[in-house]
Image: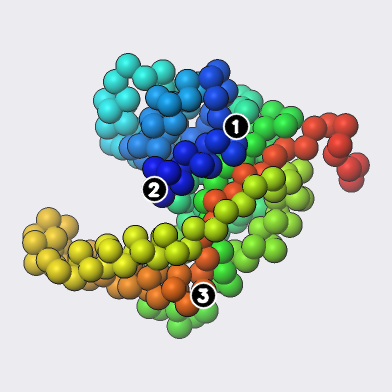
Amino acid sequence: MRASEIRSLAHQARIGPGVSLLDLCCGLAGPGRMITAESGCRYLGVDHSASALAAARELAGNLPCRFEQAHLPPLPKGRFEVVLLLETMLAFPDKDALVREVARVLEPGGRFAFTVEEGRPLAQHERARMPGADTVWLIELAELTGVLRGAGLTVIWRQEYSSSHQAIAKALHRCYRAEPSRIADQIGREATAELITAHRLWRDWLGSGRVRKFAIVAEMQRPSSMTPR
């Protein structure tokens, strides 16, 4: 996401001084570090990659950021006012299990702030074309809304970013196509070819409406407003 889009999502999720924030699949925690520096929140970033977390700790410097290594789900113990998930919802095939774990760790009135690629699940011929298709699990917006509702979460804000993310995919595709040999020297020919193919597909799918990109904030119902099962 662009910095302006991250800031907008953080604002809508009411991330501010002292707010407890759990950042899932944080990687190098670039967005999390920015949010922490600008908001004064209490930040915990979680990722399965030890090397990414080591780099995140070093880059965080004196920021009040904590990091834990874990495979998700399950989520860490504790309760949080905000759970953040950027650019990774796509990789979870069982979104119902993920969302229920998020709901479990949210305080009443807490917010789940995330980005999602929305669309019909990939057909077999599309999966055959997409590199790393085992990490590409699209979900339609109506189904996702139902998953959230079933876990006690209500969507309070939604913004579409399909056009801006198509522009990013276009730019990356042009970059990789312009200097494939130089990139291949760093990551290998096969990986370079996969990057070119993947960004071409995302460019085309976002442009045609086959896939849409959203940022969403969903709020956890308070006990008095929850419907008995």
Q: Which residue is mark 3?
A: 210
Sequence order check, earlier mark of 2 and 1: 2
On the image, the x and y values in percent for residue 31 come to: 40, 38
Q: Which residue is mark 1?
A: 14
Please give left or right for residue 75 compared with residue 146 in the image: left
Q: Which residue is mark 2?
A: 2
Residue at 40 percent of width and 24 percent of height: 37
Q: What's the amino acid at mark 2?
A: Arg
On the image, the x and y values in percent for residue 84 come to: 53, 39
In the displayed orientation, state which residue is furthest to the right.
228
**Which quadrant would the C terminus be assigned to in this image?**
top right
Q: What's the amino acid at mark 1?
A: Arg
Please give left or right for residue 225 compared with residue 165 in the image: right
Residue at 32 percent of width and 25 percent of height: 60
Camera-near label (3 vs 1) is 1
Residue at 89 percent of width and 43 percent of height: 227
Camera-near label (3 vs 2) is 2
In the displayed orientation, state which residue is furthest to the bottom.
125
Sequence order check, earlier mark of 3 and 1: 1
Residue 50 visible in the shown view = no
